[in-house]
Structure formats: C-alpha cells, structure tokens
Amino acid sequence: MSHVVMIVDDSRMIRMQVCRALQGQGFRTVEAADGQDAWEKLTRGEPIDVMVCDVNMPRMNGIELLEKLRSPGGFEDLPVVMLTTEGDPDIVRRARSLGAKGWLVKPFQAELLVATVQRMIGVVVS
C-alpha cells in the first residue's frame, strides 16, 4: 500500500510540482487549496499519512491549520512538514511548538522534499 501525502498550498503550480516529485517516488497525493479545504477533506475521512503545508494562504493559513490539527480530538499525530517562502523565526518557532516536524523553503529541491516525507513516515531508502 502506498502512503498518502496531502499537499496544502494556494498555488496550483506548487501543488503540481510537489505532487510530481512525490508521485515519482510512489506516493499517492491529495491536494488542498488552503487550510480550510485541507481540514474539510481530513474531517470527511480522507486517509493521510503526512501533510506538506504552506504557511501563507487565504481562508485558513498553515499556522491556523496546525492549531486545529493539534487540538484535542484533532489529528495530533499527523506529521506535518511546512513548505513555504516564510522565514520569520517567530513563525518557524510557532509552527514547531505546534508540532511541525520539518520546514522546507520554496523554491524546494525535489530530492530534499521526498527525503523529508520519507523520514516522516519511516520509509527506509536503500
């Protein structure tokens, strides 16, 4: 069974690039246009192993989504990797305090993204 990664980004181009990188390594992907879209898909039962999430998005940003994910009865154990142009140390600290497991900066290297996602789910690469 292949692992499922949700890509949450308001840029369709970024979602396509991330999907292409992950699908090329055997991952299945689910796309969400912002935090609200991601939350709706998760609460409808979309099975997700890892989330790759932007910070700056309309309706619900990445930090707000992390807050919802980490609330009791949320998705406390879902590994989240932030993928963003945002480099503000306060925002990085806030994301980490909410349980973000990784922080990648756009433009991203596909190999680094894939390796980070693999590490989040414990995939051993030979």
Image (cartoon, helix red, strand yellow):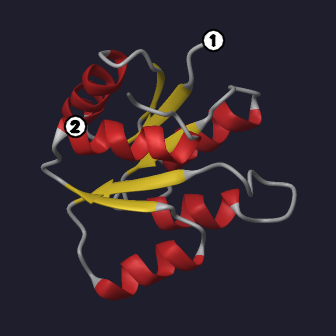
Crowdedness near tag 2: few (<14), some (14–19) or many (≥20) residues, C-alpha within 10 Å: few
Furthest residue toward left: 107
Q: What amino acid type should be assigned to the residue bearing mark 2?
A: Glu
Say above or below: 107 vs 87: above
**Number of numbered tags placed on the structure image:** 2
Identify residue type, mark 1: Met
Please tell me which residue is depicted at 50% across the width and 31% down the height of the picture. 5
From the viewer's perspective, is 33 left or right of 110?
Answer: right
Closer-to-camera residue (97/36): 97
Horizontally, residue 1 falls left or right of residue 29, namely right
Q: Tell me the number on the disc at residue 1.
A: 1
Mark 1 surroundings within 10 Å by alpha-carbon count, few (fewer than 14), some (14 through 19), many (20 or more):
few
* Residue 119 can be seen in this image: yes
Q: CA distance from mark 2 to mark 1?
A: 22 Å
Residue drawn at point x = 57 percent, y = 40 percent? 121
Residue 60: x %, y % from top left: 50, 56
Circle 2 — which element?
helix
Where the C terminus falls, by quadrant? top left
**Residue 96, horizontal then vertical, whole percent:** 50, 74
Task: Inspect this view and state whether residue 59 appears.
Answer: no
Q: Is residue 102 left or right of residue 121?
A: left
Q: CB under 8 Å between callouts 2 and 1? A: no
Lower position in the chain sequence, tag 2 or tag 1: 1
Secondary structure under the numbered disc 1 in the rendered image: loop
Pointer 2 residue: 111
In percent of width and height, residue 100 lies at 52, 64
At x 71%, y 64%, the residue is: 70
Q: Is residue 60 above or below residue 122?
A: below
Q: Residue 2 is drawn in which quadrant?
A: top right
Residue 104 in the image: above or below residue 22 = below
Q: Quarter of the image containing the N terminus?
A: top right
